[in-house]
Image (tube, helix red, strand yellow):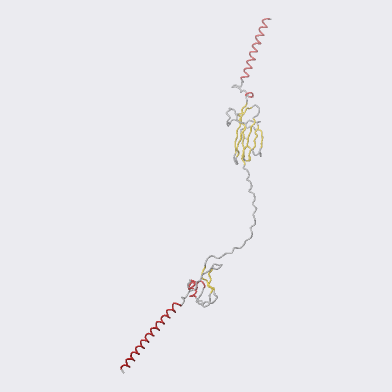
Amino acid sequence: MIKQFRRRLVLHSILILAAVFAAAWLLCLASLNVATTVQAAPAAQVPIYTPTPGPDGRIIYIVKANDTLLGISLITGVSVEELRGLNNLTSDTIYEGQKLLLGLGGPPEITPTEGPTPTATTVLPTPTPKPGQGNLCILLFDDLNGDSIRQEDEPSIPDGAISFGNRAGTVSEAVTTQAGTEHQCFNDLPEGEYTITIAVPEGYNPTTNNTEEVLLNAGDTTYLNFGAQINSENEVIPVTEGGKSPLLGIVGGLFLIAGIGVAIFAGRMLRGG
């Protein structure tokens, strides 16, 4: 009896140990299956949304099936409040195919409108400016003191000749000098280089150059003086004080001597007779 009891006790112990080992083995298998399942499950991924502006610069999202405002906010980065404000939403209700404005992404693409073809403009030649005008004033004066400088009391010499012309050949004048004290002026002459020549009347000798070259500028009045003096052959002997001329005194003296001689000759003739 004792031996049988021991055998049963040993057998029960073996069964208990076997059950314990089996349970431990099952627990290990279960833990391994759970870990494998956790590692094999893929991580949840949030779809990436790349906003692309349209031709008008607006960024539009088209609602898909099962979309919510919160889901759209998560994938676009636009808050639910902003989505409501941009699209005037009074609730979170949206429908498939609805276009939601997410914002503006840049300036709109403007397609230029073709305008009318420009008409070629004919370039007209620039008109040549008209030359300006000036005045020439010329005087042939009687150089009484022979200093070649015109004094205020030295008058003009009449019957002389003034001739002048410009280098361009558009002006050529010849006039006779007039008596008086004023210059003879020739107005509204085209600007440019001029040559002026003076011819003194007979009986006069020039005391200055009789030819001058001048540059006449627009708006200017150029004065030129030419002098001449009567020559000695034509010089009138001035009357002395008292109204008698030295020449008349000489002639009178000759007549007086001749009268005295005639008187002496006549007296001798009378004495001899």
In percent of width and height, residue 108 lies at: 55, 65
Q: Tell me residue 132's x, y (percent).
A: 62, 42
Most extreme residue toward the top is 272
Looking at the picture, tell me which residue is in the foreground, 109 or 129.
Answer: 109
- Viewport quadrant of the N terminus: bottom left
Drawn side of residue 160 relative to residue 27, left or right: right
Would you place residue 76 above or below residue 235 in this image?
below
* Quadrant in which the C terminus appears: top right
Residue 177 higher or lower than 63, as above or below: above
Residue 256, quarter of the rendered image: top right
Q: Is residue 79 above or below residue 209?
A: below
Near-viewer residue (4 or 35):
4
Question: From the viewer's perspective, is residue 101 above or below residue 221?
Answer: below
| Quadrant position of residue 116 | bottom right
Residue farthest bottom in this picture: 1
Give the residue furthest to the left.
2
Residue 126 at x, y percent in the picture: 63, 48
Q: Count the numbered circles shown.
A: 0
Occupied quadrant, residue 118: bottom right
Q: Nearer the viewer, residue 109 or 19?
A: 19
Q: Where is residue 43 in the image (x, y as percent from the top left)?
A: 46, 75
Q: Is residue 11 left or right of residue 199?
A: left
Left of 78 or right of it: where is 208? right
In the displayed orientation, state which residue is furthest to the right.
273
